[in-house]
Amino acid sequence: MPQLLFVDACVRGAESRSRALAERFLSSYAAAHPDAAILRRDLMRDRLEPQYPEVLARRDALAAAGRLDDPLFADAWQFARADRIVLAAPFWELSFPAILKIYLERVSMRDITFGYEESGLVGRCRAEKLLLVTTRGGDYSLPETEWMEMGARQLKALCAMFGIPKFELLCAEGLDDERVDASSRMDDALARADALGKTF
């Protein structure tokens, strides 16, 4: 059974526009792929500690002892074994919330999601695709602003590190800009979520 891992970093919960967009995608995906399992990882409910010195020391000791089956690495294994990955997070401070960064640091684990061989760095994740679902108050797809966007760019680079061939983005832009019709933009993004869910 194919597994889609949905990682929810929508800090505002039910009020989140990014969550609404992600749920629309997931509904479409589930309808189009009835044989697939959707695994949900809620970063607000099951919270991770940042990589404080004591956390890193424990991680390094377990890795040195070859104990990669320890629960500390559960998120990394789940990430590595997923067939599809969807991350939902709002656009904050030109990137994404800290809770997603903490999660990404946890899943970035040598000999689980990546490794080194004679040829150099190699990814070890099974997923063929990773999708970022996000909403932005401003429009960061324009030539004059796209250089400021750091979240999608970081995730695309991590896909290369983890061996995930395809990065995709589902985004509603400019939702806080009073000069545009935010409702229309969100409706357009929801329609794109419906379409993408059928093919992802």
Image (tube, grey):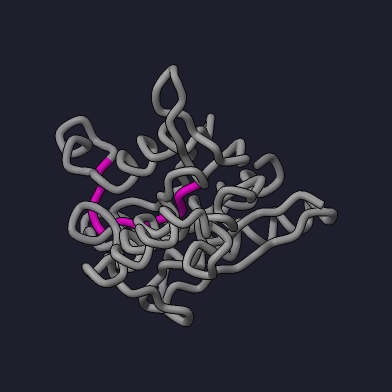
Q: Is residue 146 above or below residue 70?
A: above
Q: Residue placed at 46% from the left, 54% from the top?
A: 133
Which residues make up the magenta segment?
Answer: 131-140
Camera-nearest residue between 80 and 170: 80
Can residue 14 be seen here? The reply is no
Camera-nearest residue between 138 and 157: 157
Q: Is residue 125 above or below residue 55?
A: above
Describe residue 119's horizontal placement relative to residue 37 as left or right. Answer: left
Q: Residue placed at 18% from the left, 35% from the top?
A: 147
Q: Residue placed at 29% from the left, 63% from the top?
A: 56
Q: Is residue 118 above or below residue 53?
A: above
Can residue 134 be seen here? The reply is yes
Residue 114 placement (x, y as % from top left): 46, 39
Describe residue 132's horizontal placement relative to residue 54 as left or right. Answer: right
Quadrant for residue 96, please give it.
bottom left
Camera-nearest residue between 18 and 162: 162
Quadrant for residue 63, please give it.
bottom left
Q: Is residue 52 above or below residue 175?
A: below
Residue 134 located within the stretch drawn in magenta: yes
Q: Residue placed at 20% from the left, 52% from the top?
A: 94
**Which residue in the rendered view is the most extreme toward the top?**
119
Residue 152 placement (x, y as % from top left): 34, 44
